[in-house]
Image: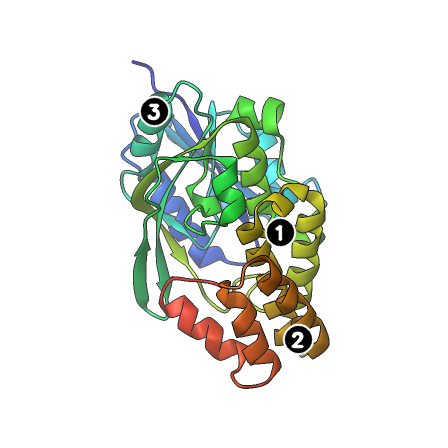
Amino acid sequence: MTLPSVSAVVPTRDRPELLRAALGAILGQDYAGPVEAVVVYDQCQPDPSLAYDDGRRRVRVIANCRTAGLAGARNTGILAATGELVAFCDDDDEWLPGKLAAQVSALAEEPDGEFVSCGIRVSYDDRTVDRPLRMRRVPLAALLRDRMTELHPSTFLMKRAAVVDGFGLVDEEIPGCYAEDYEFLLRAARRAPLVNIPTPYVLVRWHKRSYFARRWETISIALQWLLDRYPEFATVPRGEARVAGQIAFAQAAMGHRREAMRWAGRTIARNPREPRAYLALAVASRAIGSERVLRTLHKRGRGI
């Protein structure tokens, strides 16, 4: 049986040491098919010394030729990829042994499968927490209810034709590129349920250097854009409340007490049990600091 070729798209910006670790994990996969890593430099000078080719594994180095930012860099890589399958890997994450072989096999077993993900191992403050998603297939309705942070971009493996000629490239118009991975998941799930492997096959590093670690204004604007773009949220109260609660927390973290209370009220109206509303109110009233909330969540492998 001829195994499909795989292209791993690795956007990068000013993180050379982490990038080399990510590439080493990609090239070291025990997958018998051909693998290429397409390193896309975004808003920084490419390093041609990373280029490599032994006939079975290779690294290509290119510059982002589309919109500056993560979405444009990923799309540059997708369009430059030569593999039948295309995968994402952030430059601060690492694929664990067995990822590619397991995902390609899982995708082949699903006749309508176009997209496969897997569990993650979250690393934060020298502590790791496994986050397996106990679902074998993820339909659109489930994604509207819950973001499922286990579905991290570095776990994505897709049929390239389904992306380019099907549900489309990563949206480059989302404000600040925030939540572009979630919007991408929603579009993919509209065509066919996502295939998932519960096993954690990707090490995801959460750290204060992460691009969106504290960009609350961008996060708030982007999530409001998402609610407007997907009116389906109105049919899933739990999902709408989750997003509204994130907006409320972002507003509270910025010190916008009135807006935080308004969004928290909207959250509670849709789902009185949504904890983000009450965290936002606590931060808005200065009963607790937003940083403390985040540190506590991250140590458990969770986010807001």
Q: Which mark is residue 33?
A: 3
Q: Residue flagged by tag 3: what amino acid is it?
A: Gly
Instruction: Looking at the image, tell me whether mark 3 or mark 2 is earlier in sequence order.
Output: 3
The CA distance from mark 3 to mark 2 is: 48 Å
Q: Quadrant of residue 109?
A: top left
Tell me the crowding category of disc 3: few under 14, some 14 to 19, or many 20 or more residues within 10 angstroms, Cα based.
some
Label number found at residue 254: 2
Frontmost residue, 88 versus 103: 103
Secondary structure state at the residue bearing disc 2: loop
**Dot label at residue 45:** 1
Which label's residue is closer to the chain start, 1 or 3? 3
Viewer can see residue 215? no
Q: Residues within 10 Å of mark 1 (few under 14, many from 20)?
A: few
Q: Secondary structure at mark 3?
A: loop
Give me the residue at 41% from left, 45% from top: 23
Foreground disc of the pair 1, 3: 3
Residue drawn 54% across and 24% down? 162
- The amino acid type found where label 1 is placed reads Gln
Query: At label 2, which amino acid type do we have?
Result: Met
Q: Is residue 77 left or right of residue 105?
A: right
What SS does tag 1 mark? loop
Q: Residue furthest bottom?
A: 287
Mark 1 and mark 3 residues within 8 Å of each other at the beta carbon: no
Residue 38 percent location from the top left of the image:
51, 37
Residue 54 seen from this side: yes
Tell me which residue sits at (63%, 41%) in the image: 232
